[in-house]
Amino acid sequence: RPATHPARSTKVRVSVKTPLLGLTALGLILSGCAGKGEIVEGGITAVRSACPTVGVAAGTGDVTLFDPVTSRHASAIDVVANMTNVRGTCNDAGDQIATAVTFDVTARRTRADGPRDVTLPYYIAIVRGGSAVTAKRKGQIALHFDAGQTRAQASGTASTQIARSAATLPQEVREQLTRKRKAGDEDAATDPLARPEVRSAVLRASFEALVGFQLTDEQLKYNAQR
């Protein structure tokens, strides 16, 4: 049976002159769905996973429907839905790193007269290096309001795959990060991630699996301005 999250990890040691130095590196190296940092003699050891960070994309974790649809007044709010309890399970046993994401959607409506069904579109996107969307898949989640009820809830799922090779640091970069440094060495007080080429390589190997509602331009504008 393939191994599932918590995924296999690789220890990356950034040896520094003082414990305060290298915390920038620690923050970046720890990007992944599993990881921890610990202070050890000679520097910082960070456990880095190839699994993507799982979360909700900024500005798309809730959606508001209006009636009439062209209105944006509070009195016209029809349904408000929120995405919550986002969790990821990662299988990094093969050449493809598979991540299954689950989430809940809670919703409330203004009028509770009769039963009603509402279908909301959502998406999952793979983001590389904090800004580049490399893949995106869409889905739909159905909510049912019983007669007389103003609240409803449903659960959704999404999945992604990332090539292990893309989420693996190049050997030369790993060597720079793990090379032991001693107090007194010329570069003992230098954070390896201060070097642009090292920082870029770590970012390129860092992925996020982000879910959110598939919003229209007007809905995005409403979320940003309210």
Image (cartoon, rainbow, N blue to C red):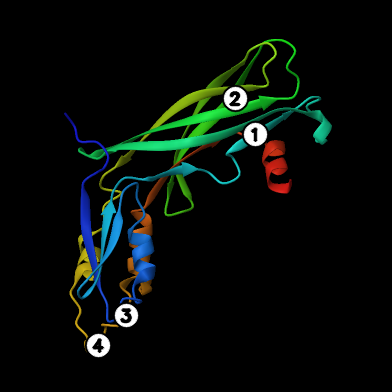
- Mark 3–mark 1 CB contact (< 8 Å): no
Q: Which residue is mark 3?
A: 190
Residue at (71, 43) in percent of width and height: 221
Image coordinates for residue 151, horizontal then vertical, percent: 63, 23
- Label 1 to label 4: alpha-carbon separation: 54 Å
Q: Which residue is mark 4?
A: 186
Element type at mark 4:
loop
- Label 3 to label 2: alpha-carbon separation: 50 Å
- Mark 1–mark 4 CB contact (< 8 Å): no
- Label 4 to label 3: alpha-carbon separation: 9 Å
Which badge, 4 or 2, comes first in the chain's sequence? 2
Name above or below for residue 174 compared with residue 97: below
Amino acid bearing label 4: Glu
Q: Quadrant of the C terminus?
A: top right
- Label 3 to label 1: alpha-carbon separation: 46 Å
Few, some or many C-alpha atoms within 10 Å of disc 3 (few <14, some 14-19, many ≥20)?
some
Q: Which residue is mark 1?
A: 63
Residue at (72, 37) in percent of width and height: 218
Few, some or many C-alpha atoms within 10 Å of disc 4 (few <14, some 14-19, many ≥20)?
few
Amino acid bearing label 3: Thr
Q: Which residue is mark 2?
A: 120
In the visual, does 21 lie left or right of 224?
left
- For marks 1 and 4, give the one nearer the viewer: 1
